[in-house]
């Protein structure tokens, strides 16, 4: 449930609010609200719903292959088993910070968190902020599996 004392709560679109309010399980719902607030702080932007992903802002990518497009610059998804934070600059770009985060698993561009009460939220906010800055600095040219700053 959205915190009515949050001064930015009025900026949460109805579809995002309904989606987050319907997240199953108190831990997953709490974590979704925590990620919502964290990503709003980092981006300064309201959330948008992209299917079952809550995204903030946009970034443009263009790969050497010529493939290009746009995607959310910061995003998360509350899933049944864990919360997923999308790091489209690759989790490898954040290896040092992730080593200090606390319990988590990673995929190429995904950070899987089972319980945010067990992780260092200051570190998580830094990871999200660094990824957001890298992705929005201009057209991003790397795939997540290449994990590193764009040149």
Image (cartoon, rainbow, N blue to C red):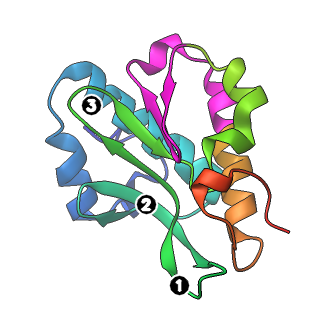
The quadrant in which residue 127 appears is top right
Q: Is residue 40 left or right of residue 9?
A: right
- Residue 7 location, x and y as percent? 49, 49
Q: Is residue 109 magenta?
A: yes
- Spatial CA distance of label 3 from label 1 is 36 Å
Residue name at image x 70 percent, y 80 percent: 139
Tags 3 and 1 touching, CB below 8 Å: no
Q: State the SS at label 3.
A: helix
Which residue, as the protein is rendered here, is positioned at the far right?
A: 151
The quadrant in which residue 33 appears is top left
Q: Which residues are magenta?
A: 103-126
Residue name at image x 86 percent, y 69 percent: 151
From the image, tell me which residue sits under label 3: 29
- Spatial CA distance of label 2 from label 1 is 21 Å
Q: Mark 2: few, some, or many residues within 10 Å (few <14, many ≥20)?
A: many
- Residue 90 location, x and y as percent? 62, 49
From the image, tell me which residue sits under label 1: 67
Q: State the SS at label 1.
A: loop
Q: Is residue 53 left or right of residue 37?
A: left
Q: State the SS at label 2.
A: strand
Tags 2 and 3 touching, CB below 8 Å: no
Q: Earlier in the sequence, mark 2 or mark 1?
A: 2
Question: Toward the viewer: 131 or 63?
Answer: 63
Whether residue 126 is visible to the viewer of this picture, yes or no, is no
Q: Earlier in the sequence, mark 2 or mark 3?
A: 3
From the image, tell me which residue sits under label 2: 55
- Residue 43 location, x and y as percent? 62, 58
Residue name at image x 30 percent, y 63 percent: 49
Q: Earlier in the sequence, mark 3 or mark 1?
A: 3
How many tags in the picture? 3
Of the two numbered discs 3 and 1 in the rendering, the one whose residue sits closer to the viewer: 1
Q: Mark 3: few, some, or many residues within 10 Å (few <14, many ≥20)?
A: some
């Amino acid at each position: 449930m959205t915190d009515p004392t949050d001064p930015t709560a009025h900026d949460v679109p109805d579809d995002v609010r309904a989606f987050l309010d319907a997240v199953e399980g108190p831990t997953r719902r709490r974590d979704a609200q925590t990620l919502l607030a964290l990503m709003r702080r980092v981006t300064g932007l309201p959330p948008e719903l992209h299917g079952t992903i809550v995204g903030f802002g946009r970034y443009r990518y263009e790969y050497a292959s010529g493939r290009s497009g746009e995607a959310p610059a910061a995003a998360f998804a509350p899933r049944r088993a864990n919360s997923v934070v999308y790091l489209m600059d690759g989790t490898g770009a954040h290896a040092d910070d992730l080593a200090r985060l606390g319990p988590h698993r990673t995929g190429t561009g995904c950070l899987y968190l089972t319980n945010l009460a067990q992780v260092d939220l200051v570190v998580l906010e830094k990871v999200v902020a660094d990824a957001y800055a890298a992705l929005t600095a201009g057209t991003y040219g790397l795939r997540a599996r290449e994990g590193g700053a764009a040149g």
